[in-house]
Amino acid sequence: MNINFSKVQKQRLRELDAPLNLQEKSFSSVQDRDEAFRDIEQQLVRQGKQHLLEIRNTSRRPALCELETKLTNVLVKNGFVQVVTPIILAKGMLAKMSITPEQPLFKQVFWVSEDKCLRPMLAPNLYYLLGEFARLYEKPIRVFEVGPCFRKDSKGGHHLNEFTMLNLVELGSPEERGKQRLEELAAIVMEAAGIKDYQLIPASSEVYGETVDVVAGLEVGSGVIGPNALDAQWGWVDPWVGIGFGLERLIMVSKGHQNIQRVGRALMYFDGVRLNI
Ligand code: ATP
Ligand code: MG
């Protein structure tokens, strides 16, 4: 007989982030199955509690905070200037990114008033600042921001309504080195995130046209090699490369989690641990 975990048991195993092969296990009797369930549940609960203790008793912080610190340090060390820009964005800034009502991303925007929204991306603010920096700094100019972004994304294991984006841009490095720089910059971030196994795959975006996705089982980042049709209106025209990464996705991959909810901003989870244990 092939008996699988019941719906309720599967739900609990998912909550506790049991490995997929355990969730799919089959048994020859209900008794065997229920015993196995109790054992696995107990073990996962123990692991979760252990993790919570570790956070309290050591200098460890939630993975999302630790990754942000790590990425910030490594980028600053590589000559990037960190910027901190407003989370509330004017509608006009979206329009300048060609995100107008006909565009799919427009429908995912959270509006706080008629002409102000929660930023769905960091790019418009970085474009704006680079317009200022292009006058003030010698090239190449390297900037990055890491912070919250908001999108009404269809719920699923890879999307959050609020997530943490890292966007880095290098403006004014030689155009013929664009592809190589993109690879080098992706490598800096992926190494800091502890992910060895990834690929750069050509893709396309409604906003930028041609892009290069950073894929590690799932998309963790999207890069662009400029110049781009959008650039001129922001007051600069040099070659550039930029990549936007989702920090929660990077953590999902590096820690082997099956859904993104447990690593994002949450009340049901703390640093990946379901709290009803
Ligand atoms: P997807 O196609 O997976 O929805 P995207 O291509 O729309 O993502 P981008 O605009 O390229 O996303 O954003 C850059 C990165 O930000 C993505 O590669 C991903 O890591 C992250 N990201 C985007 N949307 C979300 C979301 N809703 N939740 C979590 N991370 C996200
Ligand atoms: Mg993308």
Image (tube, rainbow, N blue to C red):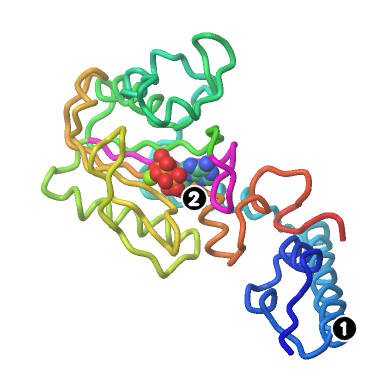
Q: Quadrant of residue 163?
A: top right
- Label drawn at residue 35: 1
Q: Residue at x 53, y 33 (%)?
A: 151
Does residue 90 appear left or right of residue 10 in this picture?
A: left
> Where 110 sits versus 176, above or below?
above
Asked whether residue 163 is drawn in magenta, I would say yes
Q: Is residue 215 above or below residue 242?
A: below
What x and y, as percent, mark residue 175? Answer: 13, 43
Label 2: few (<14), some (14–19) or many (≥20) C-alpha neighbours in 10 Å:
many
The reply, left or right, for residue 144 in relation to residue 97 is: right
Work out whether residue 48 or residue 23 is closer to the camera in this orientation and state it: 23
Q: Quadrant of residue 96?
A: top left
Task: Report if residue 38 lies within the magenta region.
Answer: no
| Mark 2 or 1, nearer chain start | 1
Residue 216 visible in the displayed image: yes
Q: Nearer the viewer, residue 16 or 169?
A: 16
Q: Mark 2 near mark 1, Cβ–Cβ under 8 Å? A: no
Q: 164 and 100: which one is in front?
A: 100
Q: Amino acid at mark 1?
A: Glu
Tell me residue 20's x, y (percent): 63, 73
Where is residue 188 drawn, in percent x and y? 38, 57
Q: Residue at (53%, 62%) from the top-left corner?
A: 253
What's the distance in space between the residues labelled 2 and 1, CA to CA? 44 Å
Image side of residue 102 versus residue 69, left or right: left
* Element carrying mark 1: helix
Q: Amino acid at mark 2?
A: Leu
Residue 192 x, y percent position in the rendering: 47, 59
User: For the magenta stretch, what is the residue range?
Assistant: 154-171
Seen as rendered, the residue at the extreme top is 114
Mark 2 highlights which residue? Answer: 71
The C terminus lies in quadrant: bottom right
